[in-house]
Amino acid sequence: MIPFQVELHCRDQQTLDLLCLPKSLTITLVRKLTVQFSRKAPNGDPAWKNNVFTGTAGEGAYWPAHDDDPTSATRKLNGEIPLQAKLQPSFSFPYTSVEVGPASTAYPRM
């Protein structure tokens, strides 16, 4: 598990309340694999190209922090991202790299 905390600030209470709903915000751990290779350009020089593959490594669940004041212009959310046992850590070798990092979006999920 990776614990996290998100702090949201907004002067509009209704907007802040909507952003704090359980499915309004998505916290995702993203895995990005980059493979670099070369082939000959028309002039004979090597032309490098990157192939990038991304995927979801985990999605967080969150809840309101206990010390949160519902009348404040700030809300805090605590949460955790579960990890798979087979998840590889970030690494970089010549021509290949794997990066694992957070990404977030705020939108109504259907």
Image (cartoon, rainbow, N blue to C red):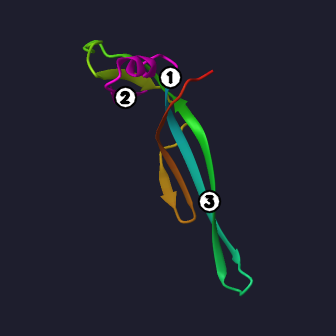
Residue 13 picture location, percent across and down:
35, 18
- Residue sitting at x 52%, y 61%: 93
Q: Which residue is mark 2?
A: 4
Q: Amino acid at mark 3?
A: Val
Alpha-carbon span between mark 3 and mark 2: 30 Å
Q: Amino acid at mark 1?
A: Ser
- Reading the chain from its start, which is encountered first: label 1 or label 2? 2
Residue 4 found in image quarter: top left
Residue 72 picture location, percent across and down:
26, 18
Is 110 in front, or is 80?
110
What span is in magenta? Answer: 1-24
Q: Is residue 3 above or below residue 35?
A: above
Residue 108 found in image quarter: top right
Alpha-carbon span between mark 1 and mark 3: 34 Å
- Residue sitting at x 52%, y 19%: 23
Q: Amino acid at mark 2?
A: Phe
Q: Is residue 60 left or right of residue 69?
A: right
Q: Which residue is mark 1?
A: 24
Q: Is residue 33 left or right of residue 24?
A: right
Question: Callout 3: 10 Å neighbours few (<14), some, many (20+)?
Answer: some
Residue 16's label in the rendered image is none
Quarter of the picture holding the C terminus: top right
Residue 5 falls inside the magenta stretch: yes
Q: Is residue 37 above or below residue 42?
A: above
**Element carrying mark 3:** strand
The reply to whether the C-beta atoms of the residues labelled 1 and 2 are less than 8 Å apart is no
Q: Which residue is mark 3?
A: 35
Residue 11 found in image quarter: top left
Residue 47 picture location, percent across and down:
65, 76
**Element carrying mark 2:** strand
- Residue sitting at x 49%, y 58%: 92
